[in-house]
Image: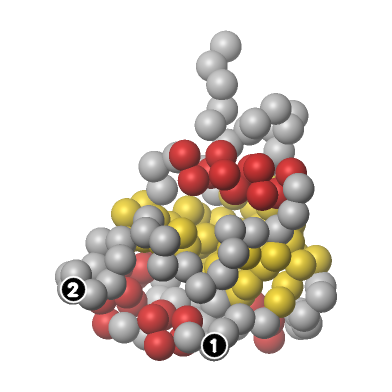
């Protein structure tokens, strides 16, 4: 029996839950860079909405994300060295495709328990979400 790299003993759990919080509003710029849009279109099959959904994780959800980080993910390699490399991990929020974005360098503006989700639509508007709501993210790994 082989071990699942994203199942750290959580009985097959493939969902991360977090509390929705407002971000710094800097992601809109990043998500609309032409090279980011091209990478997302080619590698993940969608154009990113200008912005991200920020979730604050805790406990087992942080542990599961740490296990996800160990997986290969989809490399997002910028054409300009001014930007750091990241990895995308496909997810679904309900029926909406998206991706957790994890920079490879310590350039995060958030603590480790904050995860940013990119999707083709405004998840807040589409799913009628507000700060403080619990959001479940299904890992598609």
Q: Nearer the viewer, residue 129 or 47?
A: 129
Comparing 139 with 109, the one in front is 109
Name the residue at 58% across, 58% down.
112
Q: Residue 26 location, x and y as percent?
A: 48, 86
| Quadrant of res 34 | bottom left
> Which of 132 and 81 lies nearest the eye of the viewer?
81
- Kindly tell me whether residue 94 is visible in this rendering: no
- Marks counted in the figure total 2
> Where, by quadrant of the figure, is residue 20 drawn?
bottom right
Which label belongs to residue 80? 2
Camera sees residue 75: yes
Quarter the N terminus occupies: top right
Q: Image point 24% across, 68% down: which residue?
A: 78
Q: Which residue is rendered at x = 50% and y = 55% of the image?
A: 90
Sequence-wise, the earlier of marks 1 and 2 is 1
Q: What's the colour scheme?
A: secondary structure
- The percent coordinates of residue 62 (x first, y second) are 66, 49
Dot 2: element:
loop
Task: Locate residue 127, reporting x and y percent.
Answer: 72, 77
Q: CA distance from mark 1 to mark 2?
A: 22 Å
33 displayed left or right of 3 = left
- Residue 47 picture quarter: bottom left
Instruction: Pinpoint residue 33: horizontal percent, then vertical percent.
Output: 31, 83
Mark 1, secondary structure of its residue = loop
In the rendered structure, the answer to whether residue 46 lies left or right of residue 23 reads left
Query: Callout 1 environment at 10 Å: few (<14), some (14 to 19), or many (20+)?
Result: few
Residue density around tag 2, few if under 14, some if 14–19, many if 20 or more, within 10 Å: few
- Residue 68 left/right relative to 106: right
Q: Which residue is under mark 1? A: 25
Residue occupying the point 52% across, 60% down:
100
The reply to whether the C-beta atoms of the residues labelled 1 and 2 are less than 8 Å apart is no
């Amino acid at each position: 029996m082989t071990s699942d790299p994203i199942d750290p003993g959580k009985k097959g759990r493939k969902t991360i839950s977090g509390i929705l919080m407002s971000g710094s509003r800097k992601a809109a710029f990043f998500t609309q860079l032409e090279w980011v849009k091209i990478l997302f279109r080619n590698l993940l099959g969608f154009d990113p909405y200008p912005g991200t959904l920020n979730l604050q994780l805790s406990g087992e959800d942080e542990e599961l994300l740490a296990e996800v980080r160990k997986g290969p993910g989809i490399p997002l390699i910028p054409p300009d060295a001014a930007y750091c490399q990241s990895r995308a991990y496909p997810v679904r929020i309900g029926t909406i495709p998206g991706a957790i974005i994890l920079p490879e360098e310590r350039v995060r503006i958030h603590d480790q328990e904050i995860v940013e989700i990119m999707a083709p639509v405004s998840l807040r508007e589409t799913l009628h979400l507000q700060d403080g709501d619990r959001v479940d993210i299904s890992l598609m790994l």
